[in-house]
Image: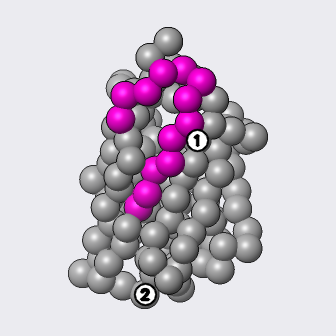
Amino acid sequence: QVQLVESGGGLVQAGDSLRLSCAASGGTFSRYTMGWFRQAPGKERQFVAGITWSGTSTYYADSVKGRFTISRDNAKNTVYLTIHSLKPEDTAIYYCARARRIWVAGTPSEYDHWGQGTQVTVSS
């Protein structure tokens, strides 16, 4: 049974940095492309970043390019999302997810396992 557990969220000030972690268990983590999504209150879940199984290719939503970095450590079965220069509009629940296929997709339906999410709140 695949489990994904996010951590690292919290209440931060605008301009701060944060690193979110997603620990995977119950599957062969290193074989799967992984993604990060976020969902703000009253809004749809939005793709943020994705990384292929080897970590050699990464993809970002245009709205976060230059501030967000996705990475992974297959030895630790963990994927990370580092966020710099946080803005109030980054406030959301952040989810990690495992992709159904080898490529990075931007739609939630292309991911078959999800974590419970971690709340990030950015105060101005």
In primary-sequence order, the first of circles 1 and 2 is 2
Between residue 122 and residue 95, name the one nearer to us.
122
Among the 4 quarters of the image, the one containing residue 55: bottom right
Q: Residue 43, percent across and down?
A: 42, 29
- What residue span does the magenta drawing correspond to? 10-22
Look at the picture and state if 59 lies above or below 93. below
Question: Crowding at label 2, few (<14), some or many (≥20) Cα neighbours within 10 Å?
Answer: few
117 horizontally vs 48: left or right: left
Q: Residue 71, percent across and down?
A: 61, 63
The residue that label 2 is drawn on is 28
| Residue at x 57% of width, y 48% of height | 82
The residue that label 1 is drawn on is 83
Between residue 77 and residue 102, name the one nearer to us.
77
Query: Which numbered circle lies on residue 19?
Result: none
Q: Is residue 113 visible?
A: no
Magenta stretch containing residue 38, yes or no? no
Among the 4 quarters of the image, the one containing residue 102: bottom right
What is the quadrant of the N terminus in the image? bottom left
Real-space Cα separation, disc 1 to disc 2, in angstroms: 26 Å
Look at the picture and state if 93 lies above or below 100. above
Look at the picture and state if 110 lies above or below 20. below
Three-letter amino acid code at the position of disc 2: Thr
Q: What secondary structure is the magenta-colored segment mainly?
A: strand
